[in-house]
Image (cartoon, rainbow, N blue to C red):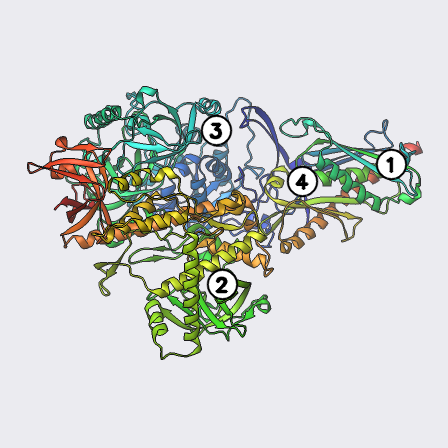
Amino acid sequence: MSRFEIYSPEGLRADGRRWNELRHIKCGINTHSKSADGSAVVEMGASKVVCIVQGPQEPETRSRVREKATLSVSVTVAPFSTTERSKHVTNDRRLQEMSANLQNLFEEAVLTHLHPRTEIVCSLTVIAQDGGLLSCCINAMTLALIDAGLPMYEYVSACSVALFDQTPLLDPNNVEETELASVTVGIVGETDKISLLILERRLGLDRLPPALELGVEGCKVLRQVMDKEVRRHGAMRLASRAE
Amino acid sequence: MLVKRASAQSVNHKVFVRSTKAGNAVKVYREQYLRDDIPCGSQLCTLCAEISVPDAKGDFPVPVLSSAPNSTTKRGPHYVVIDTNVALKAIDLLEHPGCLYDVIVPQIVLEEVRNRSLPIYARLRALTAGHDKRFYVFHNEFRSETHVERTPGESINDRNDRAIRRVAKWYSEHLAKVKKAPQVLLLTNDKKNLELAHKDGINASTLHSYIAEYKDSGDLLDIIPAEESFTKESQTQIYPNYYSSSQILAGIKNGFLHQGKLQISRYNYLEASVHTEAYPKPLLVIGRESMNRAFDGDKVVLEILPKSKWRSPLNNIADEENVDANIAAENDDGQAIVTDEERSILAKDALNAQHHEKVQPTARVVGIMKRNWRFYVGQVAPESVNDKIDSGALRSVFFVPLDKRIPRIRIRSRKPQALVDQRIVVAIDDWPVYSRSPQGHFVRALGEIESKSAETEAILLEHDIEYRPFPKAALDCLPQEGHDWKPGMNDPLFEKRRDLRDLLICSIDPPRCQDIDDALHARELPNGNYQVGVHIADVTHFVKASTPLDAEGALRGTSTYLVDKRIDMLPTLLGTDLCSLRPDVERYAFSVLWELDQNANIVSVEFTKSLIRSRYAFEYEEAQARIDDASQQDDLTKGMRALLKLSKKLKQKRLDAGALNLSSPEVKVMTDSETSDPSSVELKNVVDTMSLVEEFMLLANITVARKIYDAYPQTAMLRRHAAPPATNFDILNDQLRLRGQPQIDLESSKTLADSLDRIQDPNDPYFNTLVRIMATRCMMAAEYFAAGNFAQPEFRHYGLASEIYTHFTSPIRRYADIVAHRQLAGAIGYESLHASHYMKNKLDGICDNINMRHRNAQLAGRASIEYYVGQMLKDNESLQEGYVIRVFSNGFGVLVPRFGLESVVYLQDICNPDEAELDEDTYTLKIMQDGKSRSITVFDTIKVFVKSVKDNKGKRQVKMLLG
C-alpha cells in the first residue's frame, strides 16, 4: 500500500491536483542557440528534458543515406535525475525502446522527403524525472525540431493518463505512475487522431476510452502552450531582425 | 473546458530528507499544488458552494457538517476539529454513537494516522465515508489559506500541530461570515498544542474535559483511554527496554537478531514459540521477562539466549488465573514480574530440562515490529473490584480476556461494580516498562455473562468476524427490483448466456438449506457416455468487482456458521433468493458441462454462463430414498442414479490416488425448535448422496482450477494443501509404537491413507477414528494462494490427492469462489477480468485475508458448539468415556467423543500433584489416588465425570474429573 492516498474520496490527488489537471508546464525554445541547430527545454511539473537537434546534415555512416532524411534519436538520463542517484547504465533497454518510439512517431510528423540523403540528429537529455517522461521528451523534441526549422505537418504533443479504478488521472507524477497503470497518448496537430499510444501495464479494455478522451484533451492544451512559446520566440526574432 | 492547467503561482515545493531502507539519507522533492476550491463542508456556508468543483463523474461534493450541529449544555452548537492524538487514542469514542458529531478531520491528521496505524486510518476513513456521524475531511494542506510552511528549526511534529491549529483558526474566521455560526473547537490531548492554541485565541479543549460537558458523560468517560499512564512517574522499571530501531535493523542484517510471529502456547501462557527463517525448529520464548510485553500474534524481534539457558518445551499446563490471581489491580506496579508461583513452575521445568537431551534454543524479545492488538472480549475480575458500590471515582480493575493466551489487562472505570457481571470489550492502549500488565480502556458492554446474545457476540468479536448489518453503500449495489428480479433484466450480456432450462437439474443439500449454491444433472448420450453438469449460482452477475458490495464480501471472506446463527458473506437477498438455485424458478448459473465415459473419465469439458431451472431441491436422505426406490423410473431419477454410479467411480479413483479420509470430532448440536435452547448433541451421520454431491464438486473445482491456471498462470486463485513434514508425526508414531500399533507411513498420501486403515484396535472401534483425529492435527492447513507464488509441483492438494485445486462451487458463502468465477468468466471470454484479479500483489492481499477469515470462521463455529455443549452440560453432569490424548507433568488432556469435547484434567483437582511422576519416554503419568498408584498413558480409555462449572472468575468451563 502506498504511503499516500493516491486519489482521495474528496477527489484530490497526492499532490493536490484534481483528476483533470495538468501539472505546471514551462517550455523554452532556442535555449542552446550557440551549440545546436535547434534546441528546447520542457518542464512538466518536476520532470525536465532538454532536446538538442543537429541537422539536416551529411549522415555519418553510409547506411543512413536514404531517399528521405533519417532521424536518429538518442536519450540519455542524467544520473542525478531521480531521487536516488542511479549508477550509469549504458544501453538501457527502456531508453532504447523510447528512442525507437520517438523515431517512429516523428518520422510521420516531419516532412523527411524534403531532405533526402541527410540525417537529423536529436539528442534528448533527461535532467529530472517525476513521471510522464516519454511525453515530456516528445514535447521537447517537437519544439527543438521547430526551432531547427525543419518542416513538419503539425505540432506533436503528448501526455499520459493514469487510471485509478474508473477515474482517469491526467499527467501522473512519479508516485502515481509507480502505483497505477498509465497510458501515454500522442497526437499530431489538434485532431482527435491518436498517433502514439503506449501502455506499459495491463488494463481492462473497457477502462481505456475515458482515459484516451482525457489524454487527447490534455495534448490539445499542451499544443496551445507550445504554440504560444513558438509564437513568442518568433515575434522576438522578428523584432530583433527589424532593428 | 475538460482539462485545466495548474498555474505557476500555485506550485509549492516540498523538500525533505528521508532515510531509506538501506540506511542512506535521500533528499525528496515533491510538488504540491495549492488551491482555492476546497470547500469547508458546512451546510451553513454559502461561499463554499460557489467554489466547489465536480469530480470525474460530475458529482459535486455534498456538505456534511450539519447546519444544526453537535451541542453540549456548556458550549452550545459547535464543530469539532480533532488532533492526531485524539484520532489515534480515542477512535472508539469517535465511533461511539453517543457523542462527537460534526467533526472536521484535517488532512494532515489523516496522513499522520495513516503513517502510524493503517487499521485506525481505515476506521477513520469509514467514519468519513458514512454520513451518519458527519465527519468531514478538510484538505488543509492543499487549501492555500491553511497551508503551512515548515520554518527553519521547526520539527515536523510542531509544524503539523501548527497546521492543525491553523485549520481551527481558519474555520472560526471563515464561519464568522455566516449567521448563527457554530463555535469551532479544537480537541487535542497534547499539552503543548493546547497551550499554544489558547495563546492564539483558538477555542481548544482536551478530550477529557470536553466529554465531561456531555449530560451522561459517565459512560463515555470510561471509554476515553488514559491521558497519561495510570500511575505516577519515577516507577521502577520491570521490563527491559526494547532495542532501538537502528540496533534492530543492524542486528537482523548481521543475523544475530531474528524476527517472526510470536505464538503463545494454548496450554501454557508462559511459553511461546516463534518460527524464524534461520532455524528449522521454532525458537522458544519462556517466561514473562523473555516475552517482554509481546502479545500472541505480534511480529517480534528475538535475541538468542546463552546456551546455558536452552531447554526443552514446558510439559506442564499453566493458566494465568490459577497462578497469580491474588494481585490487586491498584498497586501492582513495581512488583517483580515473576511471582513466586511462576518461579516454582519455571524452576521445576528447568530441572526437567536438564535430565533431557532434547533441549531447544530459547530466546527473548528485544523489539516488536508489529503489534497484533485488537479488541479483547472478557470480563472484569470480580476480586479486583474493591468497592461494594460504585462511587463514581476512577478505579483500576483487572480485565480477564476469554483468550487464555492474552494477559490480564488493567483498565480504569468509574463503575466497576456495574461491569462485574457483564461481557465487555476492551482495547489496549499501552504497555509501559514499569507496569506488570498492559493498560487498556473499556469500549462497550455486550450484555450479561452467559446470556446467549452476549456470548454469541463475544465469539464473533473474538474471531474478528464482521457481523454488523451490511452498510448502505453495499446494499445499494443489489438489484433494485429486489425479490421481483427476473433473468434478463437490464443485462447486456444476456445474449452470451446459454439456455439450459430444458435440462433436468436438481439440487441435493443438507436439511433446511436455504442458500443453495450448487445443482446437478446427468443424462445419457447416444454414444453411451454421459453428459454431466454442475451448475453453480452465478453470484458474480450480481457482485461486480470493485463495488462496495464486493468490498464488503472480500472483507468478510466467508460466511460463518454458528450453532444458532449464520453470518452471511453476502446480503440475504442474494444468498437465499436471487442467487440461490431454488426449484422451479429461473436462475442464472455458471455451468461446467462434462462428457464422461462409463468409467467417469473426462472426454470433454465446457464452461458456460447459463440460465437454468432446477426441478427439485432434495435433502440428502430424501434423494437417497428416491434413488433406492425402484418404482421411480422418471428421467430425473435415472439421472440421479447415473450421478451416483459415476460418483462412486470418481471416489474410488480418488482413494486409489491416495486421498485421505481424516477425522475431526465433529458433532451437531440439536436445538429445541421453540426456545432454541440446546437439547442434545449428535454426531454427524453420513449417507451416500452426500458423497455424490461432494465428488462432483471436487471434479468441478479441479476442472476449473486447470482452466484458470491455463488462462492466468500468475494470478489464478488456487488452493493447496502441503504435505506434512515427517517430524510432525514423530510423537504420534512413538505413541503408536508403544501401543504395539503399526506406524503411520509418510511416504506419500497414499501410504498414509493405507497405514491409517491398518491401525485398528479389535476391542475398540473408535480407536481408528481417534488416531485419525490426532493425525489430522499433525497435518498442515490448506491455504488459498495466487498461482505465481509456488512452483507447479507445490500446487498439490495433499488431502485430496489432486495436482491442482481451487474453490469454485460455493460463491454464496466463500469469496475465493467469487474470484475463481470471475477468472473463469475472463478465461472463457464472457467478460473482461477486473484489474484486482490479475494483479499479483492485489490477489496476494485477497488470499491472505480469506485464509485468515476462513480459519477464524472455523474457530468461531467450534467455539459456538463448545458454548452450547457447555450450556447443555450445566444441567446434565454425567460420567463419560474419554481418551487420554496428551499428558503433562501436572495434568492430562482428555477427549470425550460423545460430545466432541476436549479438556484438561488438572492433577491438583484429583490428587497431590507433587507425588505424580511423568515418564516422557512412555508418555505415562504415574499418580497416587486414594493411596493407590495409578498410571495414565496416552490412548488410555478412562471414565471421566464431565460437568460444566463457573469458576471463581465467572467464566464457564467444562471441567472433567476422573470418574
Q: Is B857 placed left or right of B766 in the picture?
A: right
Residue A213 x/y as whole percent: 69, 53
Count how many numbered circles sit on residues in the image: 4
Query: Given this view, does label 4 or label 2 mark the residue nearer the observer?
Result: 2
Callout 2: SS = loop
Farthest-out residue, left: B931
Callout 1: SS = strand
Determine which residue is flagged by label 4: A23
Q: Quadrant of residue B236?
A: top left
- Chain letter, disc 1 residue: A
To the question of a shared chain for discs 4 and 3, the answer is no
Q: Quadrant of residue B688?
A: bottom left
Distance from the alpha carbon under mark 2 to that under mark 1: 60 Å
Question: Mark 1 is on which residue type?
Answer: Ile
To the question of a shared chain for discs 4 and 2, the answer is no
Determine which residue is flagged by label 3: B157
- Chain letter, disc 3 residue: B
Question: Mark 2 is on which residue type?
Answer: Asp
Decide which of B290, B314 is in the foreground and name it.
Answer: B314
Specify the label residue A120 is tagged with. 1
10 Å crowding of disc 1: few (<14), some (14-19), many (20+): many
Earlier along the polypeptide chain: callout 1 or callout 4? Answer: 4
Question: Mark 3 is on which residue type?
Answer: Asn
Decide which of B932, B876 is in the foreground and name it.
Answer: B932
**Contact check, label 3 and label 2, Cβ < 8 Å:** no
Query: Given this view, does label 2 or label 1 mark the residue nearer the observer?
Result: 2
Determine which residue is flagged by label 2: B538
| Residue drawn at the location 47% of the way across and 70% of the way down | B522
10 Å crowding of disc 2: few (<14), some (14-19), many (20+): many
Callout 4: SS = loop
